[in-house]
Image: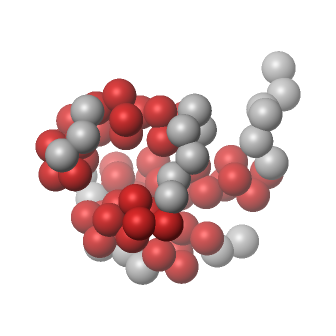
């Protein structure tokens, strides 16, 4: 089954999950830090929900990464 997302977005999703794991955080911990539900974090990581720029900035700060790291090709 082919992914519905372009390759570049799939790479972004991998970086998003990797950054969370490198930071030693669970989806539940991220959700608590952002004041959202765990399902919100899960949907972002699997690509069911797009990330807006403000959310990406919040995640980048939480994971200790610059926003540009998530967008590198």
Tell me the quarter of the picture where residue 22 sits.
bottom left
Residue lying farthest top? Answer: 1
Q: Looking at the picture, does residue 40 appear above or below residue 21?
A: above
Task: Tell me if 63 is positioned left or right of 44 in this view.
Answer: left
Q: At x 64% / y 74%, what residue is drawn?
A: 72
Residue 20 shown left or right of residue 3 in the figure? left
Q: Residue at point 49% right, 66% down?
A: 53
Considering only vertical position in the picture, is 62 above or below 28? below
- Residue at image point 18% right, 46% down: 35
Label count reads: 0
The colour mode here is secondary structure
Say which quadrant the C terminus sits in: bottom right
* Foreground of the two, 34 or 73: 34
Q: Is residue 31 above or below residue 48?
A: below
Would you say 10 lies left or right of 3 here?
left
Can residue 66 be seen at all in this image of the molecule? yes
Question: Could you tell me residue 1's position as x and y percent?
Answer: 82, 20
Identify the residue at the far right of this view.
2
Question: Residue at 69% across / 53% down in the picture?
Answer: 9
Please indicate, yes or no, whether residue 14 appears anywhere in the rendered image. no
Picture coordinates of residue 21, whole percent (x, y) = 34, 50
Residue 40 picture location, percent across and down: 37, 35
Asked if residue 31 is positioned above or below residue 65 in the image, the reply reads above
């Amino acid at each position: 089954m082919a992914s519905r997302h372009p390759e570049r977005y799939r790479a972004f999703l991998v970086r998003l999950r990797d950054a969370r794991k490198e930071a030693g955080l669970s989806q539940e911990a991220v959700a608590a830090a952002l004041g959202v539900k765990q399902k919100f974090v899960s949907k972002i990581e699997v690509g069911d929900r797009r990330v807006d720029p403000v959310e990406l900035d919040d995640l980048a700060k939480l994971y200790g990464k610059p926003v540009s790291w998530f967008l590198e090709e």
